[in-house]
Image (cartoon, rainbow, N blue to C red):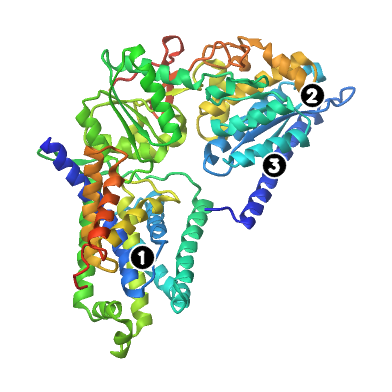
Amino acid sequence: MGTSKSEAVAARRSRRDFLKKSATAVFGAGALATFGIPRRSAAAEPVNIGGLYPVTGSFAQIGQGCVNAAKLAVQMVNDAGGIKSLGGAKLNLIISDVQSDTTVTRTETDRLISGYKLSAIHGCFASALTLIASEVAERAKVPLLTGSSSDQLNKDRHYTFTPFARASQFALAQLQMSKLVSDKPKVAVVFENTAFGTSTSNGLREQAPGEGVEIVMFEPYSAGLTDASPLINKVKASGANMLFPVSYLNDLILIIRAIKQVDLKIAINGGSGGFVIPDFYTNVGNLAEGLLGVAHWNHDINAKAQEVNAAFQKQYGEFLFEYAGGLVAQTFMIADALERAASTDPQKVRDAIASLDVAEGYAAMCPGGKVKFGPDGKNIYAHPVGVQWQHGDLAAVFPKEDARAPLLKA
Amino acid sequence: MLATVAQAVVNGLLIGGIYALVSIGVTLIFGVVKIVNFAQGEFVMIGMYISFFLASRFGIDPLLSLVVSMPVLFVIGVLLQQFLIRRVLALGDMPQIFLTFALSLLLVNVALLLFTANYRTVETPYTETTIRLGVLYIAVAKLSAFIVAMLLSGLLWIFLHATDLGKAMRAAAQNRDVAMLMGINPDRVFCVAVGVALALAGAAGSLLMPFYPAYPMVGQVFVLMAFVAVVLGTLGNVTGALIASLMMGVAESLGVQFVGADSGLIVVFLMLLLTLALRPSGLFGGWTR
């Protein structure tokens, strides 16, 4: 299906509208905040921050949640007085829709960097898109913070910073979590036969022996199932006591329902991505109860996270999910760097991010509670949290020091 | 082992019933109107959304919402024939292909615009219920879908063989010119054929809703299988499409079980290739309609 010209024009127009609206909203909020207060000597120039998220296309739903969280974070920074070392300068969030498309991501990142004087960027949710944006930002020497988990983002990059767990750590956590369920985990890995499915499942298979986990079934399937029962029939025959489905939402729904239908008692760990967003629960309902997943952030990790979650929930009606929550912390990391750099120059901001070392406040709102970047841009304290669906909400249950709720056993 | 095979066969038959409703629609339109409807899957999608909204707004069970989705789709079918298909019938194959293909793209994108790409599911009291028959587990939602699908296919067979309109449809399918000479009004027959075909797609949508999520691209998942079934069961042959659909469901399920979970379709397409090589007109080429 090609995008027709008129479609593209319409998309561009709606994107422009969207940008205009969000810009007005942010400016408006800023104006309101400064209006009543006696004027300081000179109104500090706002600091431009870029946010690259897919608000149309296949990742749109998650992208929209990210934009909401990004706006909330900027509002929090501004309400607290902005960047004090810059005379109380407000953050000005400039959102760009990267449309779930790699080509658009490249041009949009370029456009944003050359069109506005950006001090830093965050984005883009999907690793495939973030890789592109990070390349462009690297060339333009603008720092980029991201929650995307691809290990690729830490190779030969000097302007990309990843405060959260890497993909390789996710697989390890998932394997270790199977020990919570059984002393002798026998795992069935079923994965869709796509790049995402194959790479994730290979990561699991490679690390399984080291963790003492036995993989009894390792089965690719064609993504876009019409019926999951034959596949589950096979899982049942394998004698596994734990299932790792590496799937997107529609296949996951079918798999989880089929398991219930054949009355198969098996623990499920769905990893991250589509498994740890509110939409999953909306679709699977009670069947989600007790299912395990892995996330780079969860809203119950500390008091600050819970506070932000409450504010988000009040405004948008659903809990603050992994990626969106992480990006609130990222906004505060940028604010912290701006404060110390006392400059909007991206190079100085980059250096300030590189020397970031926080253990409290919103910027440290990460599993482990500390942020300090190594030379490869990785947060040296980063690790994923194991989560479980409990009463329609996600609770952190692994590792022990991050666990906020006891594990529900089936 | 035997239990696993039996379970695989049952699973295959149940999903085959849904494939049948979609493929019978395609084959009916092809048989009577001589046009390939690439948008058939999108009408399944419309049926699903009708059932979804009736269930989520008014709490109507998706199986009951058949009485809404089928008439609505029937009317859409009549309008489609009257205002679009009729105009391209006299033209060559290309405009006909473009018409239904464009319709498919249009409907998918309109659905994306209206309903977004989110998955929509309906929770019914029987969504997760299963009947145990010895070693077999049979999902109630799928079993009821299968039974209704077979009932509708049976009704269609009776309609085609026992009513004047049905006979006229078969006559028009066999030889349009002679049928016209016998006083059959092709416009009316075509409208009914497309209407019935779309009503079946709507029924498939409603029947799927208790156990399959609705999303704008959902039609494409089912229409692929439907096209294979139509060719396998001989183009235009309603009974052939029905039997071929059930066979494909079983072949797919056995393929997943014994060849590999990504090989279910391989078995199905192998079956298609073999059939085309040995009996180019399909498995039921010799049969009468």
Q: Examine the image and state in which quarter residue A403 appears.
A: top left
Q: Looking at the picture, does residue A25 appear above or below residue B210?
A: above
Amino acid residing under circle 3: Leu
How many numbered markers are drawn?
3
- Say which residue appears at 69% left-offset and 23% top-offset: A143
Element at badge 1?
Answer: helix
Q: Which residue occupies the extreme right position in the image?
A: A41
- Same subunit, tags 3 and 1: no
Q: Looking at the picture, does residue B168 appear above or below residue A304?
A: below
What's the mark number on residue B198?
A: 1
Residue A168 as seen in the image, left or right of residue A121 = left
| Label 2 crowd (10 A; few <14 / some 14-19 / many >=20) | some
- Front position among marks 3 and 2: 3
Instruction: Give percent across and percent down for residue B123.
Output: 33, 43
- Say which residue appears at 22% left-offset and 54% top-offset: B246
**Residue denoted by label 3:** A19
| Label 3 crowd (10 A; few <14 / some 14-19 / many >=20) | some
Q: Chain of mark 3?
A: A
